[in-house]
Image (cartoon, rainbow, N blue to C red):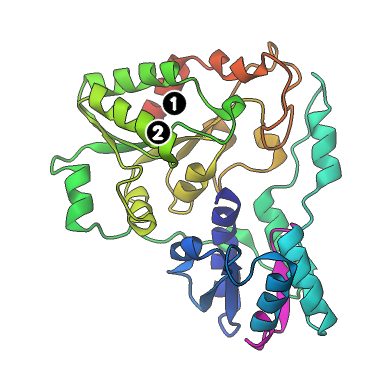
């Protein structure tokens, strides 16, 4: 989801720059709300667990896409499924441009072993390059953020009637190595909750995460868990009305960045130099584990590979550092 969310700013600019061009996004159905407000952009759902499953299903998908009358393909994913569909369309004479993930550069970054790191091209810049190859160059400095979404009565109830600054916290990530220890996050939340100055909303997904977030909610007066209680559309509406988002190197940070929120991202064994910083966020909003204590950081690009003990790297980010950054942005 984070990868898909990172395409939104680029699609905003490309659609604005080329208003006479029709763009169709091909992705999984549940992600359609991300693209609802983009001009001259429509959505086509890939049913990868249904009729588009497997090689023959992907061939069928390519035929359906071709029937739309498309002139070019921007493969912003560059994985097996997108390659199969793109190759089929290229064989039909349709132009295809594919994302360069910079795998060699990223591999070199993860092998720095305590030496200096080189900041790589951002994923957003890589996405923009795909459209440039198709003859649709864009200037990302022309990006215009959308306004906050209107809140339904249900969402207004969650935020509350009293005018308080609203903090979103997404404490989970795909791997333990990318996740701030929950006990340390509790210390952060405890301090935020004490003065009752802020409304704190917890975001996440998955059965186990929801159980933990509900438990957190019951410990604090000013904390509300929204995971598992809202539709994806409602979550996006709510995120657009936050004052700040605290997230790991994960999807919720990218969702919040779509709406010009200040996003604080916490990094464990991954590193912002790999190019996955949420859109428009400054380096000062990136809280990183101590590389002096854990010199092999970044150990991998996605956080799935790390030496024994490195899952504790985030413990070097003191709760006071997180609190000070949050309060400075609020």
Position in image of residue 4 (x %, y %): 58, 56
| Residue closest to the eye, 81 or 160 | 81
Position in image of residue 288 (x %, y %): 60, 24
Residue at point 55%, 40% (across, down): 250
Residue at point 52%, 47% (across, down): 254
Whether residue 76 appears in magenta in the rendering, the answer is: yes
What is the span of residues highlighted in magenta in the rendered image? 65-79
Task: Please indicate whether residue 67 sits to the left or right of residue 183 in the image.
Answer: right
Residue at point 74%, 47% (across, down): 121
Q: Judge whether residue 169 can be spotted in this image.
A: no
Q: Circle 2 is placed at which residue position?
A: 329
Position in image of residue 91 (x %, y %): 84, 80
Residue 280 vs 287, above or below: the answer is: below
Assign the C terminus to one quadrant of the image.
top left
Q: Judge whether residue 256 can be spotted in this image.
A: yes
Task: Please indicate whether residue 3 sits to the left or right of residue 231 in the image.
Answer: right
Q: Which disc number belongs to residue 325?
A: 1
Position in image of residue 158 (x %, y %): 21, 44
Q: Mark 2–mark 1 contact, CB under 8 Å?
A: yes
The residues tagged by marks 2 and 1 sit, at their Cα atoms, a distance apart of: 6 Å
How crowded is the residue under tag 1: few (<14 C-alpha within 10 Å), some, or many (20+)? some
Residue 248 vs 235, above or below: the answer is: above
Residue 130 vs 62, above or below: the answer is: above
Callout 1 secondary element: helix
Task: Please indicate whether residue 182 sits to the left or right of residue 106 in the image.
Answer: left
Whether residue 125 appears in magenta in the rendering, the answer is: no
Q: Which disc number belongs to residue 152?
A: none
For residue 166, which quarter of the picture? top left
Most common secondary structure along the magenta stretch: loop
Q: Residue furthest left?
A: 161
């Amino acid at each position: 989801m984070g990868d898909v969310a990172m395409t939104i700013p680029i699609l905003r600019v490309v659609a604005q720059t080329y208003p006479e061009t029709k763009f169709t996004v091909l992705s999984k159905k549940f992600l359609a709300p991300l693209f609802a407000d983009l001009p001259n952009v429509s959505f086509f759902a890939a049913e990868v667990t249904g009729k588009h499953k497997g090689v023959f299903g992907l061939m069928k998908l390519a035929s359906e896409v071709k029937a739309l009358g498309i002139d070019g393909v921007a493969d912003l994913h560059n994985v097996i499924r997108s390659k199969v569909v793109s190759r089929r369309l290229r064989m039909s004479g349709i132009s295809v441009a594919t994302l360069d993930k910079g795998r060699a550069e990223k591999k070199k970054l993860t092998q720095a072993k305590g030496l200096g790191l080189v900041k790589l091209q951002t994923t957003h810049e890589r996405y923009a390059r795909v459209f440039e190859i198709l003859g649709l160059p864009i200037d990302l400095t022309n990006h215009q953020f959308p306004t906050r979404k209107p809140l339904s009565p249900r969402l207004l109830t969650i935020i509350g009637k009293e005018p308080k600054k609203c903090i979103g916290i997404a404490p989970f990530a795909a791997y333990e190595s990318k996740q701030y220890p929950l006990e340390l996050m509790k210390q952060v939340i405890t301090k935020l909750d004490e003065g009752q100055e802020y409304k704190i909303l917890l975001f996440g997904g998955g059965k186990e995460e929801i159980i933990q977030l509900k438990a957190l909610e019951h410990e604090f007066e000013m904390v509300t868990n929204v995971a598992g209680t809202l539709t994806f559309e409602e979550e996006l509406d709510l995120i657009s009305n936050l004052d700040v988002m605290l997230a790991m190197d994960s999807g919720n940070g990218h969702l919040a960045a779509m709406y010009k929120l200040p996003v604080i991202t916490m990094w464990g064994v991954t590193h912002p130099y790999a190019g996955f910083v949420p859109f428009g966020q400054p380096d000062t909003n990136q809280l990183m584990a101590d590389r002096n204590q854990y010199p092999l950081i970044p150990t991998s690009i996605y956080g799935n590979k790390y030496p024994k003990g490195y899952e504790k790297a985030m413990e070097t980010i003191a709760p006071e550092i997180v609190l000070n950054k949050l309060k400075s942005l609020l």
